[in-house]
Amino acid sequence: MYDVEKRGNVPIYEYLYKCIRNDIVSGRIRNGEKLLSKRRLARQEGVALITVENAYEQLLVEGYIESRERSGYYVSFDAGRFVMSDYSDDSSRSSNGNIYLNHRYANNSIGNIKTDNTSRKANNTNSKANNTNSRANNTNSKANITNSNNNISGVIERDIPQVPDIADFVSQRLFDDAFPFDIWSKLMRKVLSDRNPECLTPPDPCGLPVLRYAIAGYLMRSRGIDADPDNIIVGPGTEYLENILLILSGGGALTAVEDPGYKKMGLLCERAGHKCLHIPVDRDGLDVSVLEGTSVRLVNISPSHHFPTGVVMSAGRRAQLVDWAEREDAFIAEDDYDSEFRFSGRPIPPIAAAYPERVIYMNTFTRTLAPSIRIAFMVLPDKLMDRYRQKLSFYSGTVSSFEQLVLAEFINGGYYERHLSRMRNYYGKRRENIMRLFESKEKCSINRNDTKEKYDDTKETHDNTHADRFYIQKQKENSETGIFVPIKDVAGLRIVLKAPDSLDDEKFIKALSDKGIKLSCINDYCYSHNSQYDHHFLVSFGAASEADFAKALPVMEKAAMECM
């Protein structure tokens, strides 16, 4: 039994989740072993059934367990294969007031931050020697290898109208009214009135110390990452930071990216003269087996909420990836994209929190504030930070000192976390309203027997089993389902719509473009066409309102019927 009375201030479901996870990681509950039923565990612990359901759902989405139809929950993580970091004390990393007050990087104001960089860590003299024996690149048919000499026309985005008449479901912008104009303008005036000399001096190449300390405190409170401010690099966007990583990984080195994924990463690698390995993503995340036998030194991933599929990398796959990186002396660039917008359950822990020596944590404020605020950051492992100082210390600062000071005030004053809380509430409600539009649609009169799509409404469905979305379709079709079936997700500012198999995707996208609706499909983010993503469309609701959806949906349904 788990003594829930020892949980402290941690919610009961989270305490149960951590206890079970620790038992799985430590091997006390073995791979393949069946867990107690939800009702039995609830009775045993004296807690509500919904509490156990929430704990199991979190273990499920993180890949520690799997659900078997009409059988129950089974462990799907083999602790014997990997050496995992100790999770037993990770409750100290939760977002609570004590951490906010006591952490060494929390609540630092502009006036008490040291600007002397002599306190930075000494170079790590225990680094492994570089392996000079080059190996042949993996030509596994699962992945595509490209370089700057290849024809990349296949990965350029569609030519679609810039100003749609009806709705823009492609833009990653946020709703303009969501920006905290009053607070931001107040902090701008405060920074100017303080006459801080840093406003007028060239910024530190790594970013102003006050902002780096503010970011370190925020990461500890929200993501459980104990980041050294001296290892944080601030830049004007993830593309800039990725270019730094490419330089640090060595000229012409083989770099891996997800397929499908953020296409600019692949283009950046190719333009920088690096060969790029496009690795497929399956129900557990990046297929790590493709990396074996390659000379990849840097792999780019978004494990907590993969773009664009929404898949969460399973615990076993994460351990496998870290194990590979340790053996090959490689690094993992973890883009924590969309981590702030999770509407149900506990946040997915980043890999960097457990393996800071192998993982480069990356994130941006552009996604949560505004596209015009071009401030991103990454946390480098000690080894890479030493390499940065040796090779790139001559770089000039790339982000305005004034904007950095304002953002530091925004974070240190607690405004940023309150802003994120409001945003989650705001977009959570918007998402619910949009989902209702699809769920309330009358069943389309087209003959579904003409399509290959079949749905099994007898299978157990979990709101956050993103893994099964493209591989084992579990969505239920009933008398209220329209042409488009939204695939359930609990994170991000986008919804994946599944259309009938008889739909001509290209014709449909073109028809919508002519009618003033911007829409993309999953295959737009693949390096090469992948049939498993056919008829899956991506709709972003960051800047599109419920009214935009209500106006666009009839047009989309009519266009779909004309394209089948």
Image (cartoon, rainbow, N blue to C red):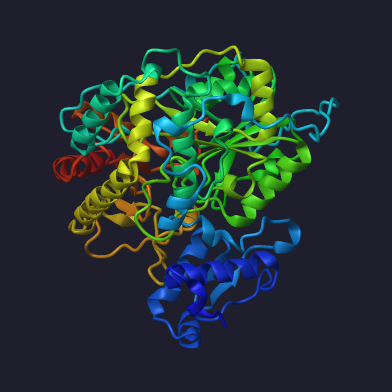
- Quadrant for the C terminus, please: top left
Above or below: residue 71 compared with residue 57: below
Residue at horizontal 42%, vertical 13%? 201
Percent of width and height locating residue 359: 62, 40
Q: Tell me: 159 left or right of 80.
A: left
The correct choice, above or below, for 65 with respect to 527 in the image is below
Looking at the image, which residue is at 59% across and 62% down? 89
Image coordinates for residue 28, horizontal then vertical, percent: 69, 73
Quadrant in the picture for residue 202:
top left
Q: Is residue 56 above or below residue 38?
A: above
- Residue 509, how many percent across, how many down? 30, 32
Q: Is residue 266 left or right of residue 525?
A: right
Say which quarter of the image contains residue 171: top left
Q: Is residue 195 left or right of residue 136?
A: left
In the image: residue 428, left or right of residue 122: left
In the displayed structure, 249 sits above or below 175; it is above
